[in-house]
Image (spheres, coloured by chain):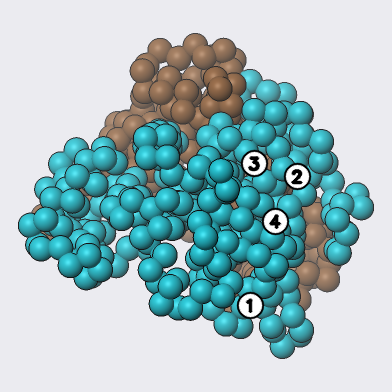
Amino acid sequence: MAMIDIQGLSVTFRSKGHEVRAVEDVSLSVAAQESYGLVGESGSGKSTILRAICGLAPVSAGRILIDGKPLPQGRAFSRQVQMVFQDPYASLHPRHTIDRTLSEPLAIHGLPGSDAKVVQALQDVGLPPAFRFRYPHQLSGGQRQRVAIARALMLEPKILLLDEPTSALDASVQAEVLNLLNRLRAERGLTFLMVSHDLAVIDHMCDRVLVMQHGRAVEELARADLANARMQTGYARSLFEASADRLMETK
Amino acid sequence: MSPLLEVQNLRVTFDTETGPVEAVRGVSFSLGRERLGIVGESGSGKTMTGRSVLRLIRPPGRIQADRMVFDGHDLMTAGEREMRALRGKRIGMVMQDPKYSLNPVMNVGDQLTEGLRRRDGLGRADARAKALAALEAVQIRNPERVLTAYPHELSGGMGQRVMIAMMLIPEPDLLIADEPTSALDVTVQAEVLSILDRLVRDRGMGLIFISHDLRLVARFCDRVLVMYKGKIVEEIAAGRLMQAQHPYTQGLLNCLPRIGGSRAALPVLDRSGGWAQEGTQ
């Protein structure tokens, strides 16, 4: 059964008589333990889909099923689904220590053993235990993103929603974080729904990818089709051709 | 022909409470009418190197150099008045993010014509005509509308093109572009690059292209300087980047995922070598 099943999803923002259709009639289905990518340019609605799953965007039509059931609410939802945001400089509380950031989900859910779990979580993402007592500004961008990933995993969710998790990082640090995400997915059997504007990153991380433009799904590609440039639509092809990775070969 | 810009042993130092921090540590290069790329990670000093050429580093930052000469002007001894005559007019700079680099409460037309009217004393109509031509040169389709727009009404790609147009109006001899495309989508990025490329070729401008993206720089530039911790670790012709010798350059190249590449863990930059240690060449 599909872990994430989205049918005919539309998201419409309304303000002062304006209507913006950020997502229009998008359907996708992600199997358990699969890694699925959403790719497109800014304004294509890819991040809005993640936000709609989290209940952070106004869904105007369609349905979202998680593990075959309608979206759970409140704490039951955060047990199953967690999100990692793009900018690790903005997504961690600047005045909370790493220890407080990581133990807060446990406190909210009334789970015991927070001390050992925090140390373990830091170790899992490759950070030394002493980092517990630091503040976000004392960490580099890559270290902060590791903390954000550790926090998302504190409640042992089944699904991680990744919104451009490495686009604020240097190429060398990006490689470390992508490797970490892949290792965690293999170890824990996680399901990934990942958004990126970088086709090469999506190709490295995902089994299937949905190309989006102007809020609509353009084309779904399996990994082999992407690698061999077997795309059907002109837009998917232009995105492929413009990818920095290709630029070098066509030189 | 003597080079357009010559920099020898450039150092940028910030005096902090815990002692001086050197952001750039002895960088030397020269530039003709060509496209020079400067690549490195954040904190490698690439932006500081670019800003030093315009002496745009505020205290507590200090610039030192044995020699820094632009087309006969000694940039180290030039007075502030001489520098102001060079900035914009002879040496232009395109900043990274149009969201933060354009004036949010001034429409595009006023921003584009401000320099023309103040510095060159052009009339309103002449300045407007030049601004329109500049917007057309960066392939903005309806320049009249953009002239009356405010920055928040423009998309990222449009804003970036407006900034490039602004820098090109005085027809500088040298353009320093600091990550001019990193805020843009890939398809827009390709467009902006081809605009820059044509301008460099048609006008015979010198270009310093600062970026963290090695692949982009390799495709776009003639020559690449790779910086690490404030030093140039390797200088290489862009076409030969794949044969780079320095472990840092190789590491930067290899850690990028590739479409159709292996799914195995990406190689991670190994900083244990002697080159990565502080204070070594």
Judging by colour alone, the chain drawn in cyan in this rendered image is B
> Camera-side residue: B46 or B2?
B2
First in sequence: mark 1 vs mark 2: 1
First in sequence: mark 3 vs mark 2: 3
Kindly identify which residue carries mark 2: B234
| Residue B245 versus residue B281 in the image, above or below | above
| Chain identifier of the residue bearing label 4 in the image | B
Amino acid type, label 3: Val
Residue B28 image label: 4
The percent position of residue A142, horizontal first and vertical second, equals 68, 56
The hue in which chain A appears in the rendered picture of the protein: brown
Disc 1 from disc 2: Cα separation: 25 Å
Can see residue B254? yes
Which mark lies nearer to you, 1 or 4? 4
Kindly identify which residue carries mark 1: B62
- At mark 3, the secondary structure is strand
Mark 4 and 3 residues: CB-CB less than 8 Å, in contact? Answer: no
